[in-house]
Image: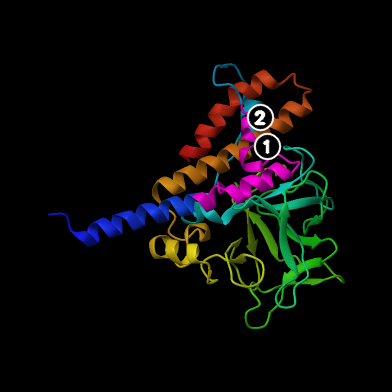
Amino acid sequence: MINKNTVINSNLSRLVTVCVLAVAFSSTSALAADKKKSQAVSPISAYKTNSPSKKSTTGNAQVDKALEFLIPKSMGKKLNAIQWTFGASKIGRPVLSGNRYQLVNLAIEKGLKRQKRTVAANLGFQNISTSNFNMQVKRQAGNGQLRYGDVVALHLKPYGWLRYKKQGSGGGINLGDDDNKPHYIWQVTGGKKGTKVYSGMPFALYNTAPMKREVIFCPRTSGIDLGWRGKSKCNSKLAKISGTVFGANGALSGDGLTGKIAKEWKGKLCKAAVGAASAYVTGQTGGVGAAGVDAAGPKALKKCNDY
């Protein structure tokens, strides 16, 4: 005889998995409607446009190196913390210190913006755009192209330099702004240290002080839906349900991310990163290097997924 509790638990597990995947990979009808309004290509799916052909077999070591992207082993148990990218007018643009981009959260495919609130940080989300570049990134190490491992300051126009600032009760994530000086408290992680960052490449946004944790998508009852990985309590019904299976903050927190969901998410991250690098190399050669990119792309994808 089949145990009734076993059937209920099995059905609940399937329901949770479907719900979490719907959020993690932005497949809800509401987000689909938002995407239609947006002029931009989704960074997480941009590889469909720039993807190399698997039929090509020729290539060279220089292009292989240019397309190589590896996720550090240290990120293995927190893959979902890698959920940010810098958006530009095109995928594959070098991210340069001092320039403005759109800071996009890949979990919900929305960009960060200033949004006036009576309580909590004046932050909100907006559709991905090819023109509203409101986030300036400034390297602590000086001018030049952003690389994984760099510590940066972030200036949200017209908000100010993002910093840690304690909010009142019910104020959501403890962030604030400061127009007087940059706060070098953000580190771009999630890729091999020293690898150059291009628009569309995914990364984790790590706070070096005082939280020493990554900023993640975190459904809340008040304030912007952001939190600290493994620390913030996410209050939505979906977060609570998924939390019973995948950890305190649900699958998007990156806590306890394992199995099929982890593999699929890593595959999407690898595609986004290799796709961005492919677009850059192709653009730099005026399309002449496309054949080499065609050959290097699949190899880079396999190496990223197998690492």
Which residue is denoted by mark 1 in the rendering?
276
Q: How many marks on residues? A: 2
Q: Is residue 177 above or below residue 149?
A: below
Q: For the N terminus, which image quadrant?
A: bottom left
In the rendering, at what x and y percent does residue 117 appear?
A: 75, 73
Q: Residues within 10 Å of mark 2 (few under 14, many from 20)?
A: many
Could you tell me if residue 137 is visible in this image? yes
Q: Which SS class for mark 2?
A: helix
Image: magenta residue range: 22-51
Distance between the alpha carbons at the discs numbered 1 and 2? 8 Å
Q: Is residue 46 magenta?
A: yes
Q: Earlier in the sequence, mark 1 or mark 2?
A: 2
Which residue is denoted by mark 2 in the rendering?
50
Q: Which SS class for mark 1?
A: helix
Nearer-the-camera pick, 256 or 211: 256
Q: Magenta stretch: dominant SS?
A: helix
Horizontal relation, residue 108 to residue 78: left or right: right
In the rendering, at what x and y percent does residue 266 appear?
A: 51, 44
Nearer-the-camera pick, 146 or 222: 222
Q: Is residue 185 magenta?
A: no
The residue type indicated by label 1 comes to Ala
In the rendering, at what x and y percent does residue 188 appear?
A: 66, 55
Task: Report the residue at 35% width, 58% height from top.
Answer: 12
Nearer-the-camera pick, 47 or 186: 47
